[in-house]
């Protein structure tokens, strides 16, 4: 659960292709619960950051800082005596630089690099992300529109291997640019929960997302 919210903008208010500068703050808590009846908390990662973005024509650029830290869940620790002695204090304090481009109205291509000046317990400085998003631009109306998104995340601690994620489904976009999506996702690679950063996992599921 998290959000990214604009706190200052110098530019226009186009909901689809904003032009100018914007300063945001972002924060999220990403928890993993067991699937049994107890829904025990295994781990939770916290992220907070301050990105500055700039849009011109069909290009967008991002410069910013983020902090990420991983924490072992209390119920996991209770159910696994001794696990606190070996818990991973995975921390990243990183500067990031990103760029995205719309070659056509319905496709966004992006790339991002981040360097952690503070990295502990398995984290290494460099990480890279690449991906694309495809959906019909503009207000969708009640009928909505299909979407597809893929992302590749490469991390130095895995010799620049990492994980692959894909999402597909249906979305609704209003006049404010806010987006409601429902669909399915697939994940394959090193765990997205950094307490178990060295584990390889596959995930498949369905979800609902609201982007604002």
Image (spheres, grey):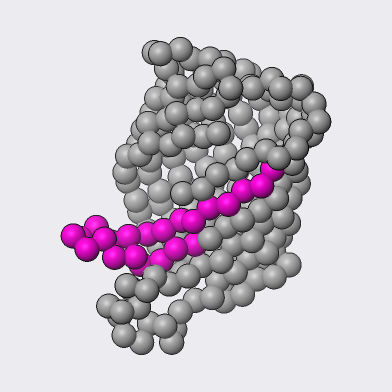
Place residue 48 in its image quadrant: bottom right
Residue 24 picture location, percent across and down:
69, 43
Residue 202 visible? The answer is: yes
Residue 198 visible? The answer is: no
Is residue 32 covered in magenta?
Answer: yes
Q: Is residue 6 left or right of residue 174?
A: right
Residues drawn in magenta: 24-45
Residue ID at (37%, 74%): 74
Place residue 20 in its image quadrant: top right
Q: Nearer the viewer, residue 84 or 161?
A: 84
Outermost left residue = 37
Residue 143 picture location, percent across and down:
39, 13
Tell me if residue 195 comes above or below residue 180 in the rendering. below
Is residue 86 covered in magenta?
Answer: no
Q: Nearer the viewer, residue 140 or 112?
A: 140
Residue 193 picture location, percent across and down:
45, 61
Residue ID at (26%, 61%): 39
Q: What secondary structure prevails in the magenta region?
A: strand
């Amino acid at each position: 659960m998290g959000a990214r919210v604009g706190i200052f903008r110098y530019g226009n208010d186009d909901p689809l292709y904003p032009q100018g500068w914007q300063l945001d703050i972002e924060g999220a808590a990403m928890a993993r619960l067991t699937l049994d009846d107890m829904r025990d908390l295994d781990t939770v990662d916290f992220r907070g950051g301050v990105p500055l973005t700039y849009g011109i024509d069909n290009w967008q650029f991002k410069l910013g800082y983020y902090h990420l830290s991983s924490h072992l869940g209390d119920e996991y620790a209770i159910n696994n005596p001794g696990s606190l002695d070996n818990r991973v204090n995975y921390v990243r304090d990183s500067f990031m630089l990103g760029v995205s481009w719309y070659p056509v109205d319905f496709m966004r291509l992006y790339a991002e690099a981040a360097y952690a000046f503070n990295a502990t317990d398995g984290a290494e400085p460099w990480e890279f992300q690449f991906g694309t998003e495809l959906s019909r631009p503009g207000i969708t109306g009640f009928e909505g529109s299909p979407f597809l998104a893929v992302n590749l995340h490469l991390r130095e601690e895995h010799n620049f291997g990492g994980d692959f994620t894909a999402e597909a489904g249906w979305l609704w976009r209003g006049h404010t640019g806010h987006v409601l999506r429902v669909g399915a996702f697939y994940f394959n690679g090193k765990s997205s929960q950094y307490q178990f950063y060295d584990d390889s996992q596959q995930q498949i599921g369905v979800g609902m997302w609201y982007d604002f």
